[in-house]
Amino acid sequence: MLKYLARRLSATFLVITLVSMSVFGIFAVLPMDPAALTCGKACSAPVIEANRHRLGLDVPVQVQYGRFVKGLFVGRDFGEGAAAFHCPAPAFGYSFNRHECVTTLVAEAFPVTLSLAVGAFVLWLSVGVSLGILAARKKNEWQDRAATAFVLIGTSLPTFISGILILLFVALKFNLINPIEMGRWVSPLEDPVAWFRTFIFPWIVLALLYAATYTRFTRSNVIETSTEDYIRTARAKGLNERDILRKHTLRAALAPIITLAGLDFAGLLGGAIITEGIFNLPGLGRLSIRAVLRDYDLPTILATTILAAVFVIVANLLVDILYAYIDPRVRVAS
Amino acid sequence: MTLKPFLEVKNLNVAFPTEDGLVQASNDISFTVARGETLAVVGESGSGKSVTSLAVMGLHDRKRTQITGQAFLNLDSGPIDVISADDEVVRKLRGKAMSMIFQDPMSALHPYYSIGNQLIEAWSLYNEGDKAAGKKRAIEMLDLVGIPDASKRVDEFPHQFSGGMRQRVMIAMALINNPSLLIADEPTTALDVTVQSQILQLIREMQKEFNMALILITHDLGVVAEVADRVNVMYAGKIVESGGAEDIYYRPDHPYSIGLLNSIPKIGELDSRRLVAIPGQPPSLIHLPQGCSFRARCSFSDRVANKLCATTAPTLDTKTTEHFSRCHLPESELVKARKESGGI
Amino acid sequence: MSGLKTSRRILASTAAIALAVGVTVASGTSANAAEKPVTGGTLYFVTNAEQFDHIDPARVYTGRDIAFLNSYLYRNLVSYKPVAGSAGSSLVADLATNTGVPSNAAKTWKFTLRAGVTWEDGSAVTCADVKYGVSRPFAGDVITDGPQYLVQALDIPTDKDGASVYKGPYKKTGQAAFDKAVTCSGNTITFNLNRSFADFNYALTYPAGAPVKASKDTGDKYDLRPFSNGPYKISSYKIGDQLELERNAAWKKSSDTVRTPYPDNIVVRFGLAEDVRDQIMLEDQIPNTASLDALQPANLRAFFADPTKKAQRFNVYDPYVRYAAMNVKKGHMDCLDIRKAVFFAINTQALIDLSGGREFYGDPGDNPVKPVLGLDYAKTTGNIHDANWKITGNATYAASLLEKAKTSCPDAYSRATAADKGIIWDLSNTATSQKAAVLIGDAVKAAGINLKFNFIPSGQYYSTVQNRDKQNDISTAGWGADWANASTVIPELFTKEGGFNLSQNWDDAAYAAFKKKSDATKVETNRAKQAKGWQELSQYVMDQYWIIRPVFSKGQEVWGSKVGGVYYWEPQGNFGFGGMYVKN
Amino acid sequence: MTAVVLEEESQEIVQRTPKQIAWGRFKRNKVGIYAGCATIFFLSVSALAPVITRLFGVDNHSIYDGTLNEFAMPIGAMGGISWAHPLGVEPGVGRDVFALLLYGSQLSFLVAIISTVAAIGIGMLIGIATGYFKGKVDASVGRFSDFLLSFPGTFMIIALSLPLVQRVEAAGIAHENAARILVLVIFLVFFGWTGFYRLIRSQTMSLRERDFVMAAQAMGASSWRIIVKELLPNLWPTAIVFISLSLPGYIAAEATFSFLGVGVQAPASTFGLVLSDAIAYWREDPAYLLIPCTILIAIVLALNLLGDAVRDALDPKAGR
């Protein structure tokens, strides 16, 4: 197990390195010129040049990458003379458009996205899994049909539509949110009620989409597992149906959901662009979209992209470890 | 036989409604089996062997199955008809009064739980006592079924066991609560030939040890010879022949039984005779043909007068209670047929 | 909305305004003079924007931001008078005791600082602070985006690229030259300029000339937390979230004749979705709120149609002229007939309707200079006064111009008509622009012109089109004068040195003469003569069709029922923030 | 029970081909039939957009004078619905919404179908190759697909589409909307093929161990022949199920991206563009928002239902 962990960890580290290098490379070869884009109104060639230097884009991409990596470990200095300042490690760079170390921006945005992801995750997992189990148990009965209808509506509604409809025709129309506070970050530790009110509609929108997938997935897994020989064995032993479902069917049927859920959750941690946009949530998704569309803020773009990838990669690792914990076959085989 | 039967099955029918029609999987099945007795049920796959025993165990989904008839378990407290009894009543019989082991030991154990865990779970259903007591009993049972180093292996997981070992575990699990009836559904089919006989041997020992009624389901008549007291031969959902093991072996009454016997090799005769497979496919259980359902595959049907096979389904000939069959073929022709097909 | 972000502000002249197309200013309601302002409470502002473009005084350049920050956070040597109407355009002394004393043919300007003005930490605002503040815009690598008037006007040598030898207070390169140009003597600061600059004090209404305390300067990060010497100070500012102001205890009413701080707290809420912002205003959900943006056109109409909201809105001509700049660089729109053909083909009416109609969007204009500039505006001839011009577009006439181009400039003709080529028009990527593109495309197609559109993300629009290599044939734009002189319009828009030249016209045959006249007009000291020069240059620009279909645009502001004291501050084209209070 | 089902199937195999069985199952699924009809309706209506719009006497580029009031809002109830303009007119401009959506659905279907087919083609090719030949290539392709999965695809499409479109245009490969569609499709395929690849790879690996493939190998059949004759026929049901389940996803994705400003732009129009425009008018002209919403949902729903029915018919174990 330890050896397995060590191997997985080193592989993960390698993938993270590769991903960050590719992201760097991809954004470096594109014909966008952040120096020109952020150079302001009085832009001339020398100003663009100075700007390029200020942004650290006047050196080859591998040097930029080297600085980036170094900054992650020891921090980074920006500016010159009396205007110089330091971003402490882990420094993802400095956003000249927002006058902040990117790490600070990310650290401010992360709790928002985390709240969004966790709440939506809990909601969709509980709704999706319980509906899926219900539908499987009541196969072909009205409960199953209702769950199927829910699944279909959920999967057929792109989030931008459900988000807008819920925002415009429910939340705003019936004054269910305080519009001026809409999307404002409130820590759940300080004001749990306000936090809940901020996130409930975004949670619903995201959960609507994901819960449908999970209902479908759970339903078919439970049905499939129910036909397994070992379920028949459990029944032949004389176990009652409740225990069979709880101990035998669900354990096996829900294990694959861990993989799915882990990756979906990690994907959300990278930022839910559309939902955050519609509900005004200052999370990672809005941070990155703003960086792209408003001012092409390269350090922020790089940081959020790499971070989103790292979330998925790390989730992959965690899911595998968790799976090994749950499924003894994986544990020993590895 | 004068033993009081432990299980009495009377006119059992099992049918599954499907989109294509009603599948009549078990058709008018009656048999008995007593404690200490071994009943072998033989037939091709799909002949209704498993369906019948699953019905006895109450393992069919009642919503999707039509079951009629009766199956009495003669318990000390009095007989119970498991077909008409409540689900909950039948559930409490499973594992205790009757147990079952299945064909494929590879998939019959839950992959996520340790062997010990699964055994203890079965044990604790009918026994008071803490986990340690359950574990002690589990190790004891594993020892009994011949798992070496049981006290250590009890904590291992199914995938760490070989097929034969898993089947031993299954047997240990089925017997952990001293059942009166064990149904072994093709317990050796999925195993290596060398292991097969060990497992059979084990089942037989266990039967003696626990004085159980044993129903051994198999498609392999060869297996039956050494262990069975009685044999039921099933075809297309019906019992086509029933009798003592010797009767079936040496005096098979039904062309299908004859065919089955011909399809197994006999020790010492390996080279002298070709094995003969029964031609054709079994009929659809949805639209059973009129007349004898084996007719199409029977090489002797032309010897029956008046095309009787095509028009009338043969009934069980119950002239003796020990050996009977569903066949129109006269006794004289039978003797001939036995001879022609290999001189049994 | 329209995606036309305008970069500068305009000053309305005090003179009577002659309007081009006979529409008078739909004046907004102003506060009831009899009503007594209330002190206390929290005043909210809502906006769709994620942030103020800048709040570092050296970098602020948009009228709204200047008006806001100047009313609450920091003080300049001189300010516009915080009153409604044309009186608002006059200068008043603020940090200084006077509005500046010019000498040496307006090449030297002296200001004497008022006593008793303090920073938020209680320390006095000194002449050195003003000097330091003025030095910051020279650090072009740190202080971006701000106005360049001081950098250009101060008497400091330039290198061969035309850049000042002084590199700002961070690097201190060329500090001696700066120290010579700006000198402090006691409470008097002297600016030595490199040319006669009769309205230099107007340039100092920009906070780029405001004091900055050197010890509090954090370079780039000063844009998040400038040190206050006004009646409020920043208690928190988070981009994309909100800016909160609280009272600055160190500010003394006695030292400030300009500001009237009524609310206890001021909160600007950023990044609200447009629907949410509109909802708040339409339903008066937060009555102590004013919107920093105009509402979406459809909602704007609803708001202005509601008689109960009569006292919560105004609708005025804003400082801007919105237009389409023709890139006349060779290979682009270098053919006058084609430029004219596009202009005459366009359905101006439909475009104006799309953005709110004449009532809210504005009127077709005939000049890069807006009538509110008074002196410098005169009705031009040609363009919208041409007999062939129709407000809904004149495809037939446009086609005939195109036909003329066939011989006058065959290359441009083939480009404009060939199916696989076509003229490319830059637009910022918004829903309204996409629709405008449909309207424009449909109209010019009827004349036989093949027009394509390049949609640029709105945040990057101006930086993209100002990149001379990336600008396409036609770019939508907007501009407002920096103060009441077309010297902040014509040279900025149409000379190579200008800060906002989207015409790239310096290779145009007509350019040399234009440039010569522009330079001469800029240094003309006789204001009447100068105005005449700008009028003639405007006519010239319009005759060359370097810009087409100018619109003299309008702006709307709305506020909640509990906000009082609102007036339109003409020189800033925005709220007079200082007068606003929260009603009981 | 298991035994019986097996028997039932073995019985049927004798009598009917798998295709017939699947069709038989599909025919019994009423919802699937309705969804199929609806899908055919939507597909043919959008394919015939030029004909149908002509029948209605409208088109998607004309600006209809007199349909808008002086505020550029549609005259008449429900966004200006009338006999002449069955779904109303576009506020601000005055084009016919029905024609806009018809042509828009054409583009949506185009993007979705090309993306699906390309993603499946690539996934199939690589899946079979890696699943059949295994080895180092398999391992590295597997890693690469893991690698791809970790990228935030949606965000990267938004971040990179503009510069990529410029590249495509500069290279003269395609222009304007064609270039935008090309880039969008490439992106969708680039991030979309991995799912199908994994599925096909694992199926190929299991098929590879099946007797009939072993037999073919033993008989000395070439790899190519085995792939074409033995593997492909057994993989097509998976492909069909995947196509029918992916299509609605791609339709929704196209709408989402054009909503976000990636993908086609004016004067062309798709659901996403119309919806992003309609939000500004939701108070004054809710029909302009709700009608395209409803139609888009109906299309995606029909495709989803059809996909479910196809899956049930071809792969009954997965759904039931």
Image: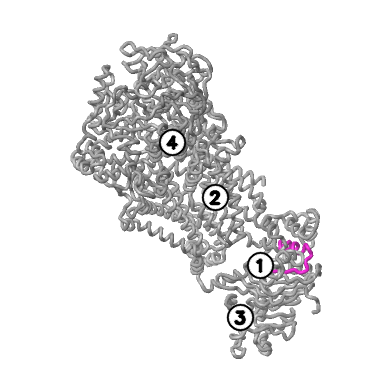
* Chain assignment, label 1: B
Task: Determine crowd level at label 4: few under 14, some 14-19, many 20+ residues with C-alpha closer than 10 A.
Answer: some
**Percent of width and height locating residue A279:** 50, 41
Marks 4/2: CA–CA distance? 30 Å
Q: Which one is in front in this view, the residue at disc 4 or the one at disc 2?
A: 2
Label 1 element class: loop
* Amino acid marked by disc 1: His
The quarter of the displayed image where residue B101 is located: bottom right
**Which of A316 and A285 lies nearest the eye of the viewer?**
A285
Q: Nearer the viewer, mark 3 or mark 2?
A: 2
Q: Residue at x 77, y 70 (%)?
A: B204
Task: Give the Cα separation between the discs numbered 1 and 2.
Answer: 35 Å
The magenta region covers: B164-185
Q: Is residue D101 left or right of residue A207?
A: left
Q: Image check: D85 left or right of D193?
A: left
Q: Rate crowding at label 2 as few (under 14), some (14 to 19) or many (20 or more) other CA atoms within 10 Å.
A: many
Residue ID for mark 4: A294
